[in-house]
Image (cartoon, helix red, strand yellow):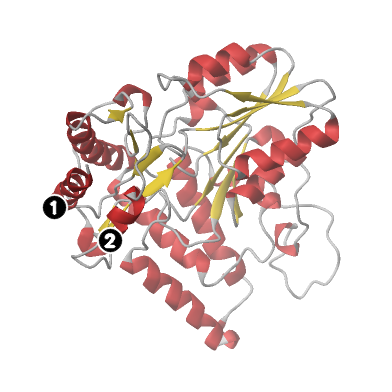
Amino acid sequence: MTAQAPLTNQRDLFQIPDEICYLNCAYISPLLKSTAEAGKRGMERKLRPWEISPPDFFSTAQQIRATAGSLLGSTANEVAIVPSASYGLAAAARNLPVHKGQNILVLAEQYPSNYYVWESMARKTGAILRSVPRPADGDWTRGILEMLDNDTAIAALPHCHWSDGTLVDLARVRHRLDQTGGALVVDLTQSLGAMVFDLDAIRPDFAVAAAYKWLLGPYATGLLYVDPRHHDGDPLELPIFSRKNAVQFSDISYRNEFEPGACRFDVGEVANFALLPALHDALLQILEWQVPRIQASLAERTAIIATEASALGLEVVDPMRRAPHFLGIRFPNGLPVGLAEHFHEQQVYVSVRGDALRVTPHLYNTEDDQKRFIHVLRSFM
């Protein structure tokens, strides 16, 4: 990838008080001020329902598909709108065949939403759920490739591990699955919007991203990419808005034919007048910033923190094996008691996930935030 010029901090676009040091985007992002306003305006439309016409139930959704397609590298027709990662993953599970004796591959300590659905599927079908052990050196890809075989029906993987940002080389995994005949389902919740996603190289069967983290969107919104080979699949719901010519509200006849594309996988009542305008605003801002520039900017922030943490004798994953926007810090003798509470008392917000202190900045973080984090870390040690 060509080197990208980093962005300056964008804190003025958010409503974050000066005394708050928020390094926890992987938990839940703050909304942009413009996003909150877009949601408010959308909600207020229902104060005057007589001004809402049938095309309004479709227009914002179509705008989101087009904008999301620009982020994913897909067409608008390949994007469904879902309320959560678990919803999109359930849709994927419904449409991918698994037989007794085959296996489904996940990562150790994978986020529960991308585990429960496959555990349930394996139990019901007689398949085997296989978990790739956490690698000591952070190289998940090697372990995945070693465990993939001709009996692997599905590899259900993230782009980076939610606990510490360790990467999966999804393009190499896709290449191996092309040889063995398995399907690839990707959870992009902890990467889309902050890290470049190469759709042409990865070619997932399904890819889902909840929008309330790195897409800076409201809770209960998400995006589902569906490869065209699955566009005739079986959706979780059967809402009217996915049907052919559903915009014709005056036509009360039942329609068996769906509109073409991934929209058949949309959640019911997809035209949410409060959440969709907010989501669209957030996606437009990410496109304006440009994901490669976001990635470069966040890589600078995590690199500075990683250098300081290493100088204190703490363990951080090699930058070649972690996502640029993520940093997992580990302590030689395990997480100290009271660490999370200490940061919280100083109004520095990070997460403890597993045995790692997870630090996930965004463009609203300043140099002072980075210095403040290091100061609080040093004071604890």
Q: Position of residue 152 (x, y in %)?
A: 71, 19
**Does residue 41 sit above or below 78 in this rendering?**
below
Relative to the observer, which residue lies in front, 84 or 370? Answer: 370
Q: What quarter of the picture does the C terminus occupy?
A: top left
- What residue is rendered at 79% in x and 30% in y? 97
Say which amino acid is labelled 1: Asp
Q: Is residue 175 visible?
A: no
From the viewer's perspective, is 293 left or right of 58? left
Position of residue 250 relative to residue 381, above or below, is below
Q: Which mark is residue 368?
A: 1
Q: Secondary structure at mark 2?
A: helix
Give residue 39's mark.
Answer: none
Residue at numbered disc 2: 345
Q: Which residue is rendered at x = 25% and y = 63% of the image?
A: 13
Whole-percent x, y for residue 302 in the image = 25, 38
Mark 2 closeness class: few <14, some 14–19, many ≥20 residues within 10 Å = few
Report the quarter where the N terminus lies.
top left
